[in-house]
């Protein structure tokens, strides 16, 4: 990148809202990425692209080849948080920059499935209406560490959440089903639900912030180079 051509765009809206993102980084924002968006962004002259959120199942996901073509054309592409983490772990060998814990988990084979980061969203606002598996797992592990639930119950709850379709994952639904399956009693389920609601480990948002911070860093480097 050079200072004259610097122009940044970030695809997000689910892991972090455009409003909150702009408070951290004043660049152009577009909704979660889908196929063709990267090619259009390159044609529009963007030289620094951040991918946080993307479409998984409702339409064609962003293609690997369009990201690679953008990188080959001299565009810097940063990914993390959700779809960005998935694509970065697959394309870091081609020069895509991956940041955040979720990217590292995919890269290191700790998690593999797309449904780990997938959520159902409000089609108008892109806000999540279900909970991502990466957040639920870390929240349940934290609940175990804080003696809200024991280790055996934690393992069973994580397994139960993983078996639930991504569109139906929620802490309320999980605790309700856990009572039905006698994993934990009703009183403990209520305590756990309260903990999860007040202390959720929002890994996707944390990683989204890291993507924004990385782009800010790259823009600053570019401005003084």
Image (tube, helix red, strand yellow):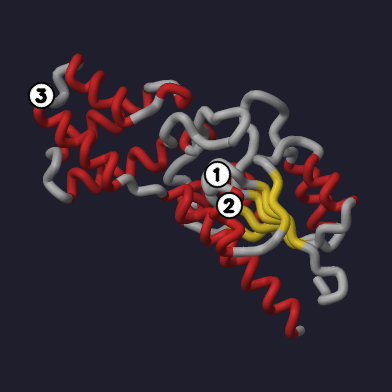
Name the secondary structure under disc 3: loop
Q: Would you say 34 lies left or right of 129 here? A: right
Q: Farthest residue toward the right?
A: 43
Of labels 1 and 3, earlier in sequence is 1
Name the secondary structure under disc 2: helix
Q: Farthest residue toward the bottom?
A: 224
Res 82 label = 1
Q: What residue sits 30% from the left and 44% below the top?
A: 139
Q: What residue sits 39% from the left and 27% below the top?
A: 169
Q: Would you say 170 lies left or right of 98 here? A: left
Q: What residue sits 51% from the left and 47% below the top?
A: 106
Name the secondary structure under disc 1: loop
In the rendered image, which quarter is residue 96 located in?
bottom right
Rendered view: 41 above or below 63: below
Res 139 label = none
Rendered view: 185 above or below 145: above
Q: Is residue 94 visible?
A: no
Task: Count up the numbered dots.
Answer: 3
Q: Position of residue 61 (x, y in %)?
A: 69, 33
Rendered view: 88 above or below 218: above
Q: Position of residue 112 (x, y in %)?
A: 49, 38
Label 3, on which residue?
185
* Mark pair 1, 3: CA separation: 33 Å
Q: Position of residue 126 (x, y in %)?
A: 59, 36
Label 2, on which residue?
19
Decide which of 93, 166 is in the foreground and name it: 166
* Mark pair 2, 3: CA separation: 40 Å
The local crowd at label 2, few if under 14, some if 14 to 19, many if 20 or more residues have their Cα within 10 Å, is: few
């Amino acid at each position: 990148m050079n200072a004259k051509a610097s122009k940044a765009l970030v695809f997000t809206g689910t892991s972090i809202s455009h409003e909150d993102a702009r408070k951290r980084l004043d660049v152009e924002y577009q909704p979660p990425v889908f196929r063709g968006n990267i090619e259009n962004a390159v044609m529009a002259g963007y030289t620094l692209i951040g991918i946080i959120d993307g479409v998984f199942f409702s339409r064609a996901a962003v293609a690997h080849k369009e990201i690679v073509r953008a990188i080959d054309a001299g565009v810097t592409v940063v990914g993390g948080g959700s779809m960005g983490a998935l694509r970065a772990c697959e394309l870091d060998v081609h020069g895509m920059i991956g940041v955040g814990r979720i990217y590292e988990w995919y890269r290191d084979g700790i998690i593999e499935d797309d449904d780990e980061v997938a959520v159902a969203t409000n089609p108008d606002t892109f806000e999540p209406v279900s909970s991502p598996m990466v957040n639920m797992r870390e929240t349940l592990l934290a609940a175990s560490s804080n003696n809200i639930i024991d280790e055996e119950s934690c393992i069973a709850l994580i397994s139960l959440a993983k078996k639930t379709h991504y569109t139906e994952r929620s802490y309320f639904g999980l605790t309700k089903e856990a009572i039905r399956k006698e994993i934990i009693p009703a009183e403990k389920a209520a305590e756990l639900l309260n903990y999860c609601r007040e202390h959720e480990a929002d890994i996707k948002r944390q990683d989204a912030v890291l993507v924004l911070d990385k782009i800010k860093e790259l823009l600053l480097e570019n401005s003084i180079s």
